Image (cartoon, rainbow, N blue to C red):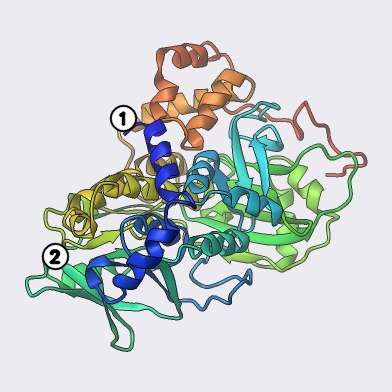
Amino acid sequence: MDDDATDNHLRTTTGPHTEHHAEHHAGDRAEHRAGDHAVVLGAGMAGLLAARVLAMRFARVTLIERDELPQGEEVFRPGIPQARHVHVMWSRGAELIELMLPGITGKLVAAGAGLFDSPRDFLWLSPADWFGPVSGSRVLLAGRELLDTTVRAEVLRNPRVRIRAGAAAAGLVAGPDGRTVTGVELRGGERLDARLVVDATGRSSKAPAWLAALGHPVPAVTRYDSHLGYSSRYFEIPDDPGRRWQGMYVQGRPELPRGGVLVPLDGDRWLVTLVGNGEHAPSAQDEEFLPFARSLRSPALYDAIRGAVPLSSPTVFRNTVNEWRHYERLERWPAGFLVLGDAACRVNPVYGHGMTAAALAAEALAKEIRTLNPEGIAAASRRIQRRTLATAAVPWQIATSEDMRYPVTEGPAPDRATRILQRYMSRVMAGANTDQAIASRFFGVLSLTRPPGTLLDPVTMVRVLSKRHLPESPHTTAYPPHHGAPVGRVR
């Protein structure tokens, strides 16, 4: 199915007027029928979108969430450990979620989220040089607690979807031969019968152990760890009539693996996330936050926050490993079970692909189940597992190929093709800093809107190679030419 057909399908099957009358009656009739019941473990973005899609075909969908979820409150919770750090939703993710939950973008913006053009609305120092004021891709910026609360509320408007907070799964329930999952056992011993069980519990997923308990092999795992660390802090946005940017991104280089991101949030706040690899990872100490910001390749981020009022102490995060659990390679797979999102493949969050990847997996799930009844969905679990996991390939390629540039990264050594691609991508980055056509293609791929082959078509390659005179790692100015330093800046 092409993109237009997929979009039309999502519109017609997830619109607000296609469900309610049928759902009320079907839901009542099937209240106690396991055959029309799906259970989704985990109410993060992957789980919420999966529940929304499954409600197209199942009379009942139950979300099981380990955390308590105060109704109507925007709160941080343990199940989203990166919540206090910068989150980016690229254009493709925002478009897909809007199709699944019509009107969600407007509600997020009304609550304080922002829609921006990246890099045009930002000061962005790439590993090559400053991006000019070129248009690349639309991005949605919001605090993760706002995203979490708003998306969950929209999903739960569907009467087929219910949530049980403060509950956790202890294992799968299966038939005698282990070939079919028939439900899930909760901690405390309660069992929920279901035609389909979806594990969307993220990094803490116990799916390999659960499969082993049913007699299935444990999947092979590929890992790349660049030992990236975060430290994030909220600031009050200071008054500055001369400021013409909305956010900032100062990227590091292999020789100085330090960077920082600044984004605006609701409540007149900035969220600043400092990043570093290995021994350059930032600390959680208040007194070390500004000195780290001052040590970046440009003083721009430091200049922005050195006079700003901090609203919190720094919060650190270190678990940024790329990890692919190769469920798609298993020859045996139980009917009635799926693993989605970070539970199957997680990538370094510094590239901002997590939520968009979750939306892509949900889109693939919608494609696969569009003509199936619950029994057919359960029977097709192995194929669906492969198709949904395949959507992680591009985010994985982007994250791992970039992480492999850093000497501290642990993982399989890059092959010759990867090294050639890395060199070419360095040329793409240098060209995209000043060339609108290259920038448009580059950000199309980065936002997961365009396929990677876009950067390898003959027209793009000729344009990129025509700029081979541009240095890949030039000495960069403190500020971009289109936005000078603030008056009175001191280094």
Give left or right: position of 473 versus 193.
right
Give left or right: position of 142 versus 156.
right
What is the quadrant of the N terminus in the image?
Answer: top left
Give the structural element (helix, strand or loop) at label 1.
helix
- Kindly identify the residue that appears in the image at 63 percent across and 66 percent down: 315
Q: In which quarter of the image is residue 456?
A: top left
* Foreground of the two, 330 or 387: 387
Q: In this view, does 248 lie above or below 46?
A: above
Amino acid under disc 1: Arg
Quick one: label 2 or label 1, which is nearer the N terminus? Answer: 2
The label shown at residue 416 is: 1
**In this figure, which residue is indicated by the disc labeled 2?**
216
Find residue 398 and report its horizontal and vertical position in percent: 43, 39
What is the quadrant of the C terminus in the image?
Answer: top right
Find residue 261 and report its horizontal and vertical position in percent: 65, 48
* Foreground of the two, 88 or 465: 88
Amino acid under disc 2: His
Give the structural element (helix, strand or loop) at label 2.
loop
- Kindly identify the residue that appears in the image at 49 percent across and 14 percent down: 465
Find residue 211 and report its horizontal and vertical position in percent: 19, 68
Is the Cβ of the residue at disc 2 closer than 8 Å to that at disc 1? no
